C-alpha cells in the first residue's frame, strides 16, 4: 500500500515537471523567402519557416504586439546570412539559423524570453 502511494506521488511529480518545462506559447511565423545572389545575379531562394516559443506567459501579449519588429530583425539576420553562408549547392545549416535568430530575439526581448526553432528550410534554384 505504501509502495503504491509513493509510485503515484512520483508519477504526479513527473507530470508536474513535464508541464513546467512546456513553453507558455508557440508562434509560427510566416515563411521568410531570402534571395541568394552570386556575382550580382539571383541564383536561388532560401525558404525558412521559424517557430518562436515564449517561455513566460506574462510576456506573450507583449511579444505578439512586437512581431513586426521581430520579423524585421530576423529578416536582417537571414539576409546577412544569405550573403555570407547560403549557397544553392549546399544545404542550409538550421543550427546556425537558430543560433543567429536567438541572438536577435535575446536583444529584442531579453535573455531567454523566447526560443526560436527552425521548422523547415529549403533552397530553390531560379
Image (cartoon, rainbow, N blue to C red):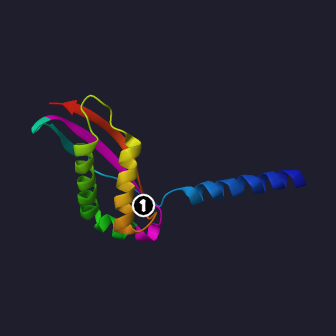
- The residue at 33%/37% (across/down) is 92
> Is residue 11 in view?
yes
In the shown orientation, is residue 10 left or right of residue 112? Answer: right
Q: Is residue 10 above or below residue 111?
A: above
Nearer to us in this view, 24 or 111: 111
Residue 114 spot, x, y in % from top left:
42, 60
In the shown orientation, is residue 92 left or right of residue 35? Answer: right
Residue 94 spot, x, y in % from top left:
38, 41
Q: Is residue 94 magenta?
A: no
Please tell me whether the stretch drawn in magenta is mainly helix, strand or loop.
strand
Instruction: Label 1: state its secondary structure.
Output: strand
Q: Residue furthest front?
A: 39
- The residue at 23%/55% (across/down) is 76
Residue 23 spot, x, y in % from top left:
49, 58
Nearer to us in this view, 102 or 32: 102
In the shown orientation, is residue 89 left or right of residue 95? Answer: left
- The residue at 46%/67% (across/down) is 57
Q: Quadrant of the C terminus?
A: top left
> Is residue 27 in view?
no
Kindly identify which residue carries mark 1: 114
Q: Which residues are magenta?
A: 43-59
Q: Quadrant of residue 120?
A: top left
Q: Is residue 13 above or below residue 117?
A: below
Amino acid at each position: 500500500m505504501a509502495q503504491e502511494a509513493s509510485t503515484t506521488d512520483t508519477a504526479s511529480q513527473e507530470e508536474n515537471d513535464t508541464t513546467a518545462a512546456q513553453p507558455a506559447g508557440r508562434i509560427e511565423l510566416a515563411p521568410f523567402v531570402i534571395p541568394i545572389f552570386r556575382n550580382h545575379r539571383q541564383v536561388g531562394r532560401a525558404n525558412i519557416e521559424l517557430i518562436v516559443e515564449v517561455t513566460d506567459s506574462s510576456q506573450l501579449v507583449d511579444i505578439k504586439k512586437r512581431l513586426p519588429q521581430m520579423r524585421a530583425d530576423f529578416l536582417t539576420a537571414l539576409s546577412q546570412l544569405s550573403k555570407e553562408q547560403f549557397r544553392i549547392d549546399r544545404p542550409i545549416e538550421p543550427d546556425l539559423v537558430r543560433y543567429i535568430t536567438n541572438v536577435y530575439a535575446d536583444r529584442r526581448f531579453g535573455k531567454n524570453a523566447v526560443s526560436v526553432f527552425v521548422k523547415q528550410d529549403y533552397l530553390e534554384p531560379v
